[in-house]
Image: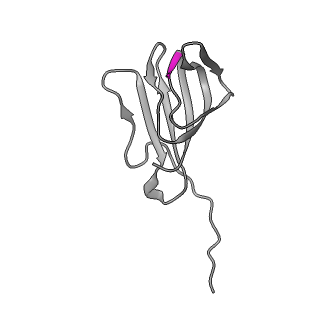
Amino acid sequence: MSTTTPAVRRFTPGGEGGPVRFGDRQIVVTPAVEAAEGGPLSTYSAFFGAGESAALPAPYDEVWVVIRGKIVVGEAGRTVSAVAGDHLHVPRDSPGTVEAIEDTELVCVSVPAH
């Protein structure tokens, strides 16, 4: 019986698909690892310009790492602020929004892959 040892692989955000822009808004999502890779998770980087916001609900769990900037996440009365270096766990179907207080860059990991 033969077994294959997993190998470390490198993915560059925006590889084949490139960045996804949301109209004329200052929100850009750049996929890196997607479901097509066959793994258990997805990763992407995201940029939110100061003042931009987006709805939160997603049908998967995510962990976000704030690389630069400041965001507020959640719903009225239940928000969390995060700055560079912070990690956030955003559970599946979390209510509310993410709002950039200043230009913000994130790295996001989603489980399961999508």
For this view, does 76 lie left or right of residue 83? left
Q: From this viewpoint, which residue is outermost toward the right?
A: 85
Q: Which residues are magenta?
A: 96-100
Q: Position of residue 107 (x, y in %)?
A: 57, 36
For this view, does 70 lie left or right of residue 13? right
Which of the two residues, 92 or 68, is positioned nearer the viewer here?
92
Q: From this viewpoint, which residue is outermost toward the bottom?
A: 1
Q: Is residue 81 above or below residue 57?
A: above
Q: Position of residue 55 (x, y in %)?
A: 44, 25
* Magenta stretch, overall SS: strand
Which of the two residues, 58 or 13, is positioned nearer the viewer here?
58
Give the mark count.
Answer: 0
Q: Residue at x 44, y 23 (%)?
A: 54
Q: Position of residue 68 (x, y in %)?
A: 60, 24
Query: Residue 95 colored magenta?
Result: no
Q: Residue at x 50, y 22 (%)?
A: 96
